[in-house]
Amino acid sequence: MKCPYCSAVDTKVLDSRNLEEGCVIRRRRKCETCQKRFTTFETVELSMPMVIKRDGRREHYKQEKILKGIEKACEKRPISAIQIERIINNIEKAILDISDKEIQSKEIGNLVMMYLRHLDPVAYIRFAAVYRKFQDVEEFVNELKHDEFNQFKKTEQNKDQSSEY
Ligand SMILES: [Zn+2]
């Protein structure tokens, strides 16, 4: 590892530490030439499969899409960012179990539903109700901007209120 200050190649590892259950390794290093200290983080980079869309087009897997869909489904639910991060890690592992070459977008959607179901029933129902119609996470996210979903949310809120009485 090159020193970021003087670009010398000789750096010494002072300390290694596992973070996030061993998925990240943090190393404290010292440059033998200029004596400055710096930290490096080592993470595993998963190589995700290509996604085959419903119309047959292939595109690179984008975590962003799943993240947006899950965040939308979990809106105003008691679910932390860490829980969402964890569920995404699990979904990505499950995707890789299916294939590291290519995967149908609907298989990804099914995995999202499966994991959401365990996480939160309301988030699951929200996601599934709209997603089933489209079979594509991207279309699901787009649809959230439209009235139908808002209408759906309203009905849900009404149900919540009525159950209070
Ligand atoms: Zn240096």
Image: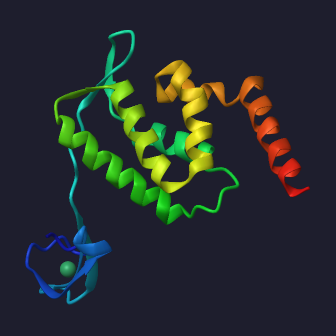
At x 31%, y 46%, the residue is 92
Q: Position of residue 87 (x, y in %)?
A: 41, 54
- From the viewer's side, name the closer residue of 63 and 161: 161
Total numbered circles:
0
Protein image colouring: rainbow
- From the viewer's side, name the closer residue of 38 and 62: 62
User: Which residue sits furthest left?
Assistant: 10
Q: Is residue 36 visible from the viewing direction of this image?
A: yes
User: Which residue sits furthest right?
Assistant: 165
Is 84 above or below relative to 147? below
- From the viewer's side, name the closer residue of 119 and 90: 119
Q: Quadrant of ligand 1?
A: bottom left
Indicate left or right for 151 with 83 as reference.
right
At x 66%, y 31%, the residue is 144
Q: Position of residue 47 (x, y in %)?
A: 20, 43
Q: Quadrant of residue 127?
A: top right
The C terminus, quarter of image: bottom right
The N terminus, quarter of image: bottom left
At x 87%, y 57%, the residue is 164
Q: Is residue 4 visible from the viewing direction of this image?
A: no
Q: Position of residue 25 (x, y in %)?
A: 22, 74
User: Which residue sits furthest top?
Assistant: 55
Is 74 above or below relative to 112? below
Q: Position of residue 122 (x, y in %)?
A: 63, 47
Indicate left or right for 112 with 16 as reference.
right
Indicate left or right for 9 with 152 as reference.
left
- From the viewer's side, name the closer residue of 142 and 136: 136
Q: Quadrant of residue 58?
A: top left
